[in-house]
Amino acid sequence: MARKSVNWGIWNYGPEGALKDAMKSDLAIRFSVERSKLDDLSQRLAFALAPDTVKTSVVTIVKQIEKGPEQLEAFLQDLRRAEHYLKKASQGFSNLHIDYPNAGQRADDPNEFWRRMFHNAVTTVEHIDHSLTRSAGKHSAHTLDEPDKRRARDERRTIVLRQIFEFWERIGRRVSYSTDGITSERRGPLVDFVNTIVPLLSDPPATISGETIRSEIQGWREWRDAMASVSIPE
């Protein structure tokens, strides 16, 4: 069964970082890590989860502009369909009479109240339709949707996991995984460490598949090699 994307706890964290003291104490015991070293990881994870760490890309903005007219036209079509059915419902109700206790006393007849409500609703929708149709002809529009939401989530995941990989290496552990010979499932201490931390940083608590962790490790290694090959002019 496919796992859902992680809903990260995006926040400006305080001095203790993304991991609370109790979380750090538990991690220190479970994975035999010095408690003080987890303070640095907590700060790095706070950076990875800060709202400004993953910015809206230029590509996203361009896509929002390109998609605007199409989404506006679809909205206007939905509005006109709603207007059509609202008028149809109003006409249908005008031919009905609900036998309320005070029906027939025109001033207090609920049937009259609902007819006025239908009339006002139709008038309002017609006004919205006419006004926005004129606006669409005079002004540009862009969508507020993010066409690459999945990409943004993946970028966040990559940043979080790279902080964990770097930490794992700094404390002298191997950034690696093993593969179950029967199930082909990716396992190992690092996989366990990742999937102990990720639920602490997500809401609802989530985990990351071993295969995704394997892919992220490969990407991290390629990124490290690329950075090492860059020559810095003196």
Image (spheres, rainbow, N blue to C red):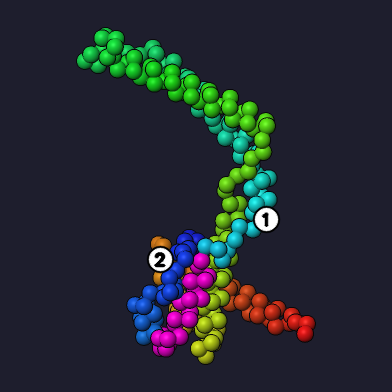
Q: Nearer the viewer, mark 2 or mark 1?
A: 1
Q: Which mark is residue 19?
A: none
Q: Main secondary structure of the magenta part?
A: helix
In this figure, which residue is indicated by the disc labeled 1? Answer: 59
**Depth check, front residue: 64 or 150:** 64
- The vertical placement of 81 against 150, above or below, is above
**Category of crowding for the residue at label 2, using alpha-carbon neighbours closer than 10 angstroms: few (below 14), some (14–19), many (at least 20):** some
Residue 201 picture quarter: bottom left
Q: Where the C terminus falls, by quadrant? A: bottom right
Using residue 121 as the reference point, say whether residue 25 is left or right of it: left
- On the image, the x and y values in percent for residue 197 come to 43, 74
Dot 1 falls on a residue whose secondary structure is helix
Task: Specify start and end residues of the magenta stretch as a single range.
Answer: 30-50
Q: Three-letter amino acid code at disc 1? A: Val
Residue at the location (43% across, 70% down)?
14
User: Does residue 39 belong to the magenta stretch?
Assistant: yes
Q: Is residue 206 visible?
A: no
Could you tell me which residue is drawn at 52 percent across and 71 percent down?
47
Q: Is residue 5 above or below residue 111?
A: below
- Whether residue 113 appears in magenta in the rendering, the answer is no
Q: Nearer the viewer, residue 69 or 189?
A: 69
Residue 142 x, y percent position in the rendering: 63, 43
Q: Position of residue 206 (x, y in %)?
A: 43, 66
